[in-house]
């Protein structure tokens, strides 16, 4: 997820933890604990993305692909991060250090805020199609939630509005609320949000603002409801993703019964469980080929056909409408022999394949077409000529190959 979402989620949980503990006997301690838990949960929910400093260990784009969402996004390596965060607070914040020495509730809240913050970061990153491998080194497989867009405004509204309503300054509170809602209007005008999605977001903002206002400035009711709605939203997205993946698999099987559908990387449109972009991977071992398709899916074509999904993300210019439910944007066919040869003979390509979920390969370069769009250049592209004179990389994390099912001939994989 984006940094704003991680920050808002961390602040919301930190605030909820603080309001769930008994009050400190001293008002100064109460204020310090409030700040401490907000800072702790916010920092813990943001710390894992400091892995960006490790990207220089490998040449671009390998450094970003293999070290971002890497070791810092694992349960094991969350422990040294938590210890580092504790040390920073202990050394640099004398008031917090005194509070932690004297208050059992502050210590409990600090521990809880840290654990939830780090866990929350990994859970939220799991939700999209980029993937994480949280159980490394015990299990180094990539896990993909395929549920929500990587920048999801629903979380901004659900978690941000109750927080804004707790701001004492009326002017600052109004500024935050106007900014939150105004951003959604802007995204809608730019074609990222459907009108129905905008209406849902505004309705949610009004509901939570009224709820928190009526509950009072010291109540946790608005935050609790917001978290429950967030969990419900993720549940709806997860169910829609699974249904959409089944629809895609059935459609692809009808188009080519001889191919085996291996994967469908699903990405929801923002705040829109009906519209999805997808990248499918099929394999035909007998023909020695694999196929990639990129397209748009509507899981309710009678309500919103694929051609009616928000234009900015739908790549309508290139769409080939197969049915009201599915519109293919592109189709590529690759050679299994070439893919396996490059992996065995080219160490930089082998490293790249530890990230690639949908590998599009030519004689000159390779790209993961999950990230091909009309909005920006594909940041995963590796050009072979740029690595021809370089030694094999030494700092390659040993993530499992996402496409081991393509790299290993069918029937010879170990189980």
Image (tube, rainbow, N blue to C red):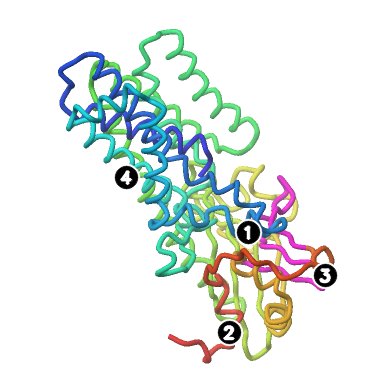
Quadrant hosting residue 310:
top right
Looking at the image, is 215 positioned above or below residue 370?
Answer: above
Q: Whole-Å distance between the Cαs marked 3 and 2?
A: 25 Å
Q: Whole-Å distance between the Cαs marked 4 and 1?
A: 32 Å
Q: Position of residue 315 (x, y in %)?
A: 69, 50
Viewer can see residue 217:
yes
Viewer can see residue 214:
no
Quadrant hosting residue 24:
top left
Find the magenta span and give its range: 358-382
Find disc 3 in the rendering and name its residue. Answer: 388
Q: Nearer the viewer, residue 190 or 390?
A: 390
Q: Where is residue 65 in the image (x, y as percent from the top left)?
A: 62, 57
Find disc 2 in the rendering and name its residue. Answer: 408
**Residue at (63, 51) in percent of width and height:** 307
Magenta segment includes 237: no
Q: Whole-Å distance between the Cαs marked 4 and 2?
A: 39 Å
Q: Nearer the viewer, residue 47 or 10?
A: 47
Find disc 4 in the rendering and name its residue. Answer: 115
């Amino acid at each position: 997820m984006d940094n704003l979402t991680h920050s808002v989620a961390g602040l919301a949980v930190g605030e909820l933890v603080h309001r769930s503990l008994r009050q400190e006997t001293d008002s100064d301690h109460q204020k310090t604990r409030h700040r401490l838990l907000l800072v702790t949960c916010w920092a813990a929910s943001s710390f894992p993305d400091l892995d960006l400093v490790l990207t220089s260990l490998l040449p671009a784009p390998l450094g970003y692909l293999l070290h971002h969402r890497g070791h810092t996004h694992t349960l094991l390596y969350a422990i040294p991060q938590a210890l580092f965060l504790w040390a920073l607070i202990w050394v640099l914040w004398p008031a917090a250090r005194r509070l932690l020495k004297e208050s059992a509730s502050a210590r409990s809240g600090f521990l809880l805020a840290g654990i939830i913050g780090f866990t929350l970061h990994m859970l939220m990153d799991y939700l999209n199609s980029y993937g994480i491998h949280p159980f490394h080194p015990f299990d180094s497989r990539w896990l993909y939630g395929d549920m929500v867009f990587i920048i999801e405004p629903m979380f901004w509204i659900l978690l941000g509005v109750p927080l804004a309503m707790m701001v004492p300054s009326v002017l600052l509170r109004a500024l935050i609320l106007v900014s939150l809602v105004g951003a959604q209007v802007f995204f809608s005008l730019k074609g990222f949000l459907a009108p129905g999605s905008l209406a849902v977001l505004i309705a949610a903002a009004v509901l939570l603002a009224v709820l928190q206002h009526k509950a009072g400035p010291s109540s946790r009711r608005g935050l609790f409801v917001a978290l429950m709605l967030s969990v419900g939203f993720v549940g709806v997205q997860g169910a829609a993703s699974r249904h959409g993946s089944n629809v895609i698999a059935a459609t692809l099987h009808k188009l080519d019964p001889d191919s085996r559908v291996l994967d469908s990387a699903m990405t929801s449109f923002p705040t829109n469980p009906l519209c999805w972009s997808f990248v499918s991977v099929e394999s035909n071992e007998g023909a020695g080929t694999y196929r990639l398709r990129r397209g748009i899916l509507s899981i309710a074509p009678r309500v919103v056909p694929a051609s009616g999904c928000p234009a900015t993300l739908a790549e309508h210019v290139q769409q080939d409408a197969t049915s009201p439910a599915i519109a293919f944007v592109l189709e590529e066919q690759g050679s299994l022999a070439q893919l396996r040869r490059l992996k065995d003979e080219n160490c930089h390509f082998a490293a790249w394949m530890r990230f690639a979920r949908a590998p599009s390969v030519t004689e000159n370069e390779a790209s993961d077409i999950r990230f091909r769009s009309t909005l920006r250049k594909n940041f995963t592209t590796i050009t072979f000529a740029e690595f021809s004179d370089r030694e094999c990389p030494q700092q390659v994390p040993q993530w499992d190959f996402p496409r081991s099912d393509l790299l290993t001939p069918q029937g010879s994989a170990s189980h």
